[in-house]
Image (cartoon, rainbow, N blue to C red):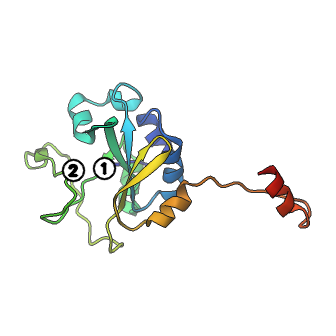
Amino acid sequence: PLGWRGLDQARDYAVPLPKIAERLMHRGWPGALVLAVPISCDQGLLKELPEETRQAVSRPVEDAGFEVWFRVPDHEAILSAMSLLPGPLVLWEDRPLGHPDLSAPQAPSDWERGKVGLIVQDQPRQYLKRPTVVRVRDQSWTLLEAGVVTESQLDQMTGKVILFVCTGNTCRSPMAEGLF
């Protein structure tokens, strides 16, 4: 996935960004949540990246054209480094041999050829499970890979939150029910 500084930077690259994706980004980042979001390669800042880079970070999807995997990791050193970069950071997570997720990106062969400027190898992750990977389309989501964030947490994170405030405690519930 691409590592982002936050929702604002993701908005610059993925145009248009579905509202449900914005909710998940706002409520689940930084953290162990990866969002697979449909993108248009001719809109937003993604079109400004070199063609080779665009092909490396986006993947074709039958129903949506292309998608990019977005993530804001909860790691102090990586977040600090990302704050100094003008663009996103490509994150690659090693997966055990035989891992069933065939859609997971493989290590770029360019790493072996010395085209990558820096590789950071971290100690074992703070979470025992992998990040949760969610595909977002329009106003719905699909769990691609179970991880730290559960389906019930995703349901809560994608829901609208409406707050009713009342000057007195006696009428708040009936008024909220009537207005809602």
First along the sequence among labels 2 and 1 = 1
Q: Residue at x 23, y 53 (%)?
A: 104
Q: Residue at x 44, y 67 (%)?
A: 150
How many marks do you count on the picture? 2
Nearer the observer, 91 or 103: 103
> Mark 1 = which residue?
1
Q: Residues within 10 Å of mark 1 (few under 14, many from 20)?
A: many
Residue, far front: 178
Determine contact: label 2, label 1, CB under 8 Å: yes
Q: Point out residue 27 in the picture as x, y percentages from the top left corner.
A: 53, 57
* Secondary structure of residue under mark 1: loop
Above or below, 178 against 54 in this view is: below
Q: Residue at x 15, y 47 (%)?
A: 108
Please give the label number shown on residue 107: none
Q: Residues within 10 Å of mark 2 (few under 14, many from 20)?
A: some
Horizontal side, residue 22 vs residue 77: left or right: right
Q: Quadrant of residue 125?
A: bottom left
Above or below, 48 against 79 in this view is: above
Look at the image and tell me whether residue 6 can be seen. Answer: no
Q: Point out residue 180 in the picture as x, y percentages from the top left corner.
A: 76, 51
Nearer the observer, 95 or 111: 95
Residue, far left: 113
Three-letter amino acid code of the residue under disc 2: Pro
Horizontal side, residue 124 vs residue 110: left or right: right
> Mark 2 = which residue?
105
Look at the image and tell me whether residue 129 can be seen. Answer: yes
Report the Cα–Cα distance between label 2 and label 1: 8 Å
Nearer the observer, 126 or 33: 33
Q: Point out residue 130 in the picture as x, y percentages from the top left corner.
A: 31, 66
* Secondary structure of residue under mark 2: loop
Nearer the observer, 75 or 163: 163
